Image (cartoon, coloured by chain):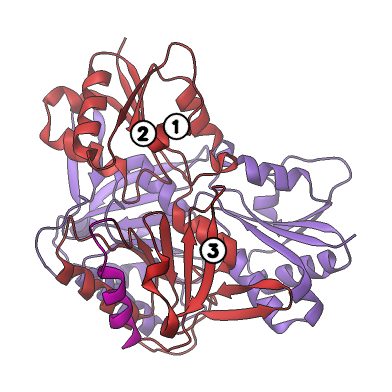
Chain colours: A purple, B red
Amino acid sequence: MSGQLAVVGLGPGDRRWLTPEADTALAGAEALYGYGAYLDRVPMRPGQARHASDNREEGARAAAALRHAAQGAHVALVSGGDPGVFAMAAAVCAEIESGPDAWRNLDVSVIPGITAMLAVAARVGAPLGHDFCALSLSDNLKPWDLIERRLVAAAQAGFVIALYNPVSQARRWQLGAAFDQLRRLLPAATPVVFGRAVGRGDEEVHVTTLDIADPARADMATLLIIGSAETRLITRPGRSPLVYTPRSAETVRA
Amino acid sequence: MSGQLAVVGLGPGDRRWLTPEADTALAGAEALYGYGAYLDRVPMRPGQARHASDNREEGARAAAALRHAAQGAHVALVSGGDPGVFAMAAAVCAEIESGPDAWRNLDVSVIPGITAMLAVAARVGAPLGHDFCALSLSDNLKPWDLIERRLVAAAQAGFVIALYNPVSQARRWQLGAAFDQLRRLLPAATPVVFGRAVGRGDEEVHVTTLDIADPARADMATLLIIGSAETRLITRPGRSPLVYTPRSAETVRA
């Protein structure tokens, strides 16, 4: 029997966002690998081995899953959200590229999931309704310089910005610095959405504007969406506001 | 009884990508609105009215669904992929903003789906594994000038580019012009992925490089992913190549 590795996107916390394809892949696996908090979201099934690892050991986790699959097993490596967006699929590809030749012969599949920015956007309307970018604010794997240049380029060109990994235990000042940069380029009233733990019991969604957005509101479970100059906020009596970016852009602002 | 409007993402063609949340919303609706080809993907249920409309009538379709919900009905408006990405959720918000006050009191929800770029990326590895942008190449709703500036800004800043709406019956030269621009900024060997009808029976995924990418390969059902200078291609004997963008960027290229 030849091995298989499925890199499976669980979506954000809510099980109603787990696709049937992902569910089938999880049910058919002999062994599951993943960050402990994600594995905890997968129902226990008899005869299925579980290998939980720490959040930061992505390369080692990918390699362990590949080694296991190369022995002939059906292995699922779970990822929160979508495995292709700042997650495990790239780590698996990197290990295949640098690993033994046999890994290039493995049956590797990636099973997409709802990524956090889509879930956060859905909660408030359609802030990603026009051109947008997704940017990780973590300077663990790239220089801060580059992150700032990308923020500036995106804001100047009129992209809405979805910010992944805005803060961590060790990264405290970066989000404030990003807001400072963006305040120089975007209107004060630009909508900003803090989406925390969307789909989980402790979900919190907060809509504000760039001039008063408080970096202290973000934690490791937060995804931010920062509007472009076109993004609009619709107030609704007795309801939370809607945020959307129109599909049309009449003027060249870039 | 008060009305409800759910804007429901069906994901790309494959039913195994329809989330349980979307399935529940479709089952509970008294009336379905949508572009005909998307409505055809929703199973018929007794007592459920269907209102199909043409691809280009997004504003009118959104308004009709809102009017129906405002009469007290439970209405679902279906969208391919994710409703928040170049799709119906922004059209609904725009109609609410300009429509009667009563529409601001409606219970409107957006139900996220797998958007095309995630499905195409999953088929080839992890091309969106690092910072990326999503850009519609349609100049029906924004000037071509602005599209070109965004392409240049994205490529110069090192974003991978997911291109939605690369061509249509009436838009034939735009993708070629986009490739010409990008060839001036990115290495010849930059991976380019054409993902056509992903998840449907007639799916075709083609991986090539920027120097020889042929615009004629794209049609209205195609989504493209154009790598950054960091994006890598892994050849595999007897298997299709993997494409991925490493999570780390060591050097500032922007």
Give how far apart the Cα atoms at labels 1 and 2 are.
6 Å
Crowding around mark 3 (Cα neighbors within 10 Å: few <14, some 14 to 19, many 20+) is some
- The image position of residue A30, as x and y in percent, is 84, 51
Asked if marks 1 and 2 touch (Cβ < 8 Å), the reply is: yes
Instruction: State yes or no: residue B172 in magenta.
Output: yes
Relative to the observer, which residue lies in front, A193 or B16?
B16
Specify whether residue B235 is painted magenta. Answer: no
Q: Residues within 10 Å of mark 2 (few under 14, many from 20)?
A: some
- Same subunit: marks 2 and 3: yes
Q: In screen coordinates, is B191 left or right of A129?
A: right
Instruction: Provide the secondary structure element on which disc 2 rests.
Output: helix
* Quarter holding residue A218: bottom left
Task: Say which label, 3 or 1, has the lower sequence index.
Answer: 1
Q: Chain of mark 2?
A: B
Q: Amino acid at mark 2?
A: Gly
| Amino acid type, label 1 | Asp
Q: Position of residue A31 (x, y in %)?
A: 82, 54
- Position of A189 with respect to B53 (left or right) is left
Residue A35 % position (x, y): 68, 58
Q: Earlier in the sequence, mark 2 or mark 3?
A: 2
Which residues lie in the magenta part? Answer: B169-185
Q: Which residue is mark 3?
A: B205
Chain ID, mark 3: B
Q: The C terminus of chain A lies in which quarter of the figure? A: bottom left
Quadrant position of residue A223:
bottom left
Q: Determine whether, in the image, residue A22 is placed left or right of residue B198.
A: right
Q: Are marks 3 and 1 on the same chain?
A: yes
- The disc label shown at residue B40, or none: 1
Q: Nearer the viewer, residue A46 or B119?
A: B119
**Label 1 element class:** loop
